[in-house]
Image (spheres, coloured by chain):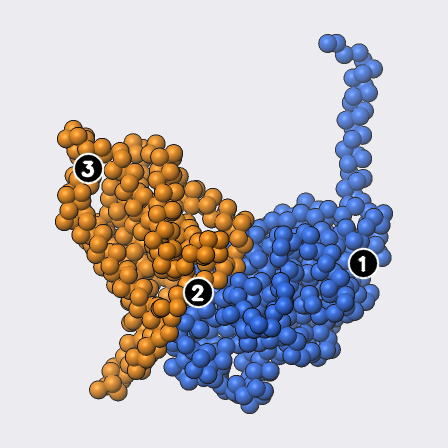
Chain colours: A blue, B orange
Amino acid sequence: MSFSRRSVLAASAAMGVAPLSRARAQANTIRIGVLNDMSGPYRDISGPYGVACTKQAVAEFGAQGFNVEVINADHQNKPDVGAGLARQWYDQGVDLILDVPTSSVGLAVAQVAKEKNKAYINTGSATSDLTGSACQATTVHWMYDTYMLAKSTGSAMVKAGGDSWFFLTADYAFGHALERDTSAFVKAAGGDVKGAVRYPFPSTSDFSSFLVQAQSSRAKVIGLANAGADTINCIKQAAEFGITRRGTKLAALLMFLADVHALGLQTAQGLVLTESFYWDLNDRTRAVTRRLLPHLSGSYPNMASIANYSATLHFLKAVKDMGVPAAKASGIELINRMKAIPCDDDAFGAGTIRVDGRKLCPSYLFEVKSPAESKGPYDYYKLLGTTPAGEAFRPLNEGNCSLVRS
Amino acid sequence: MLDAIEAILGVPAPLLFGQLLLGLINGAFYAMLSLGLAVIFGLLNIINFTHGAQFMMGAFAAWMLLAWAGLGYWWALLLSPLIVGFSGIILEKLFISRLYKLDHLYGLLLTLGLGLIIEGVFRNEFGSSGLPYRIPAELSGAWDLGFMFMPIYRGWVVVAALFFCIATWLIIEKTRLGAYLRAATERAELVQAFGINVPRMITLTYGAGVALAAVAGVLAAPIYSVNPQMGSNLIIVVFAVVVIGGMGSILGSIITGFGLGIVEGLTKVYYPEASATVIFVIMAIVLLARPAGLFGRA
């Protein structure tokens, strides 16, 4: 095989051109990185389902003159792993990091986003510090936080007569925030906090010892300031030790549809919990669930997984509104644009994003149905009450967020 | 009297008794799991890091038997160890048997890798939030002991664990089969020269050790959430138990298992934040003072 001078020239020209066109395609591509737990205790809450919901939003948004690429990774619930991946992604041109459950990781990634001036939407962590003392101009916190859970579930329990509490708290940022926010509501409603046990996370699977301690405090309510498999184990073991049968109430302060599914209605019935989404709330939520189901391998969406759908739609709307080059240039400007335009989607309905990064939506208080009341797959919740978007979250001036004062 | 105890210990006496009892129950799981590890290490010289995954498989087998075949808890207690033990035998034949001549480290890496793979496959298939498994009707309910409410099932766990521990110890220390096993541990070639099929004995021992993990898994299914990571939470603690008791010491692992369960239970009262760490602190101290473990032979 021989090379003519012309073919060599043509080849070198082509080689020079190819990266250019690739660069142009890169410049016109918005990259979304879904960073969550793909292998640990919080996998079923979002994990692969959160990724599927993000992709569904991209598909529904359709072609609007720019490409959208979705990538994902597992942060293993470790702040150092999460922050490392976030730094790498932002450096490689990822425009938005989404999801990020586990509050310690969620807070770490918020720092990285601020450093890099890139957009960050958290739909997984619960700590209310994300829009409080740790708020950033690059952060939006989507559908829930510890304050909203505490207000909805905590106040409802005190109102129903549960005026003395004992907390079982996962010993990390999320557990502490949930215990702190719930204690404040219990005390404000005239209740009394008798004590708390902070147990090591995530290496605890036997809670009987802590449950017995909680019971011997004679508190009327045992507040579970934990999530996922820990909450499931607590509820299972509380039933085993006859704690609920003897009149002590359990407050599952953070529980998702997937957790109820794992417990089974027989054990979970009667529990009171708060979510900001349920698939069977209204026609719009049923419609979006129908569209999502083929991609969720048999499971139903909960507020965390579907928040990725809702957040992605709103983010893409803002990108389209300001143009891709401007969106890529500054995370702060992009987030400001998201705050300026109103949100509306089938999952959470109409809403807004506040200056401190808090997305506002109503919160719903549910009771888990008994096996007899449940008519079909995932027919698990009865609606007890609704807190409107304006009242569901911490008032703007009480969060100590630096963005609010300026 | 009780007031005096409370004054000395700083916590109400009923609470303390309750915690001691709960510690004993957790100790039962530690004892059963570390027993299987000790048996396997004693004879195969393999540090079986797949043990946690095999404990989890035991629980899952119980769930599958119920959900897919309609067979309840008692059948599971019989069949699940057989099924999981058989899977262990296949594992030993296919992979582990190739490593006996190499350093311990290779066995550790292989079994750790296998454990991660098994866990990953289950997670892919069943998700991470777990499956429900109910306490059998005969064992549900509870006794009121005065100082605490004691679920009958937890009492059963302690009894069953003690039974399996003592039975294993008796087989190994007091029977002819046990004598062969112990002899093969010391001088495999010599035992083989007497016409005993040592490789087959080793394979069956591995299967038996794995079956013990599966029994613990079935016992755990009604108490803990049946999920793919249930074994990895326990296995590190159980390894510490084995190291403290002395690698390969059967009696050592039983006694340390129950003992450390109690120590952990007490830590949960006095300083709950450290309850996951206390066993490792003890392990460090034991390794410094008696490197062969409390019951090991140096």
The chain containing the residue under callout 2 comes to B
Query: Residue A250 placed where, x, y %?
Result: 50, 77
Q: Amino acid at mark 1?
A: Ala
Query: Residue B84 placed where, x, y %?
Result: 38, 47
* Residue A255 in which image quadrant: bottom right
Query: Residue B64 placed where, x, y %?
Result: 46, 53
Crowd class of label 1 (few under 14; some 14 to 19; many from 20; radius 10 Å): many
Measure the alpha-carbon separation of dots 1 and 2: 49 Å
Disc assigned to residue A318? 1
In the picture of the structure, the residue carrying the numbered disc 2 is B134
Foreground tag (2 vs 3): 2
Q: Amino acid at mark 3?
A: Ala
Residue at 79% x, 53% y is A60
Residue at 32% x, 73% y is B19
Q: Is residue A338 left or right of residue B234?
A: right
Element at badge 3? helix
Assign the N terminus of chain B to one quadrant of the image.
Answer: bottom left
What residue occupies the far front of the structure in this picture? B70
Element at badge 1? helix
The chain containing the residue under callout 1 comes to A
In the picture of the structure, the residue carrying the numbered disc 3 is B184
Q: Amino acid at mark 2?
A: Arg
